[in-house]
Amino acid sequence: MNDSLLGKVSLVTGCSRGIGAAIAERLAADGADVAISYVKSHTAAQRVVAAVKAKGARGEAFQSDAANAQAVSALVPQVVERFGRLDILVNNAAIFFSSMLEDSSDEEFERMVNINVRAVFFASRAAARVMGPGSRIINIGATSVNHVPSPGISLIVMTKSAVAGLTRAWARELASRQITVNCIHPGPTETDD
């Protein structure tokens, strides 16, 4: 463990596996305490918490459905209550459905907007209310924002483009408070189902 983030508290959403789990472990390795959110698998979330603790950091999992605006809005206050502060928010929770425009359902559209965009907005708004100078908001986007590699991915392109736009706007808004906002655009990543 190095101490570059020692004393910092982080929250990573959608963190029971894949990119989120890797981010949580890296934050812990750099000294940050790590809160994670998950929606389904308590067992998988506890594995991530155990990995965080194994690196010498405090860790805790919070069940929170990113599709539920009230649950997302309540998540940051829960983390602050438990850890005393919040310095780093990683908006990682996201879903992906592939379907051609004419075959897309209203339910797919609403669910992707709710999880991929609304949850990012609500979590970031709650975080901005409690963060101090030097804090960070990191949004996980997708390379498909700039390069659409195949048909049938319009909904992920739309939602991740919205996140990229929000990131640019919030970076400008929060700069005067010395809060940095960035978006990372990973390419296709193999994770378990």
Image (cartoon, rainbow, N blue to C red):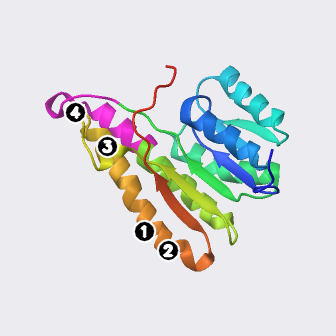
Q: Is the residue marked by circle 4 packed among few (<14), some (14-19), or many (20+) residues within 10 Å? A: few
> Disc 4 and disc 2: Cα gap in Å?
34 Å
On the image, the x and y values in percent for residue 139 come to 50, 52
125, above or below 140, in the image: below
The residue depicted at 55 percent of the width and 30 percent of the height is: 18
- Residue 165 location (% of width, % of height): 37, 60
* Element type at mark 1: helix
Q: How far apart are the two marked residues, 3 and 4, measured between alpha carbons?
A: 9 Å
Crowding around mark 1 (Cα neighbors within 10 Å: few <14, some 14 to 19, many 20+) is few
Q: Can I make out residue 164 in this image?
A: yes
Name the secondary structure under disc 4: loop
Q: Residue furthest bottom?
A: 176
Of tags 4 and 1, which is closer to the observer?
A: 4
Left or right: 16, with 34 as reference point: left
Residue position for label 1: 169
Tell me if 103 is positioned left or right of 97 in this view.
left
Query: Which dot, 4 or 2, sits closer to the camera?
Result: 4
Is residue 98 part of the magenta span, yes or no? yes
Question: Secondary structure beneath disc 3?
Answer: helix
Which is more N-terminal, label 1 or label 4? 4
Q: Which residues are magenta?
A: 97-115
Q: Which mark is residue 144?
A: 3
Q: How many marks?
A: 4
Q: Give me the C-alpha separation between circle 3 and circle 2.
A: 26 Å
* Real-space CA distance between mark 2 and mark 1, rounded to the nearest whole angstrom: 6 Å
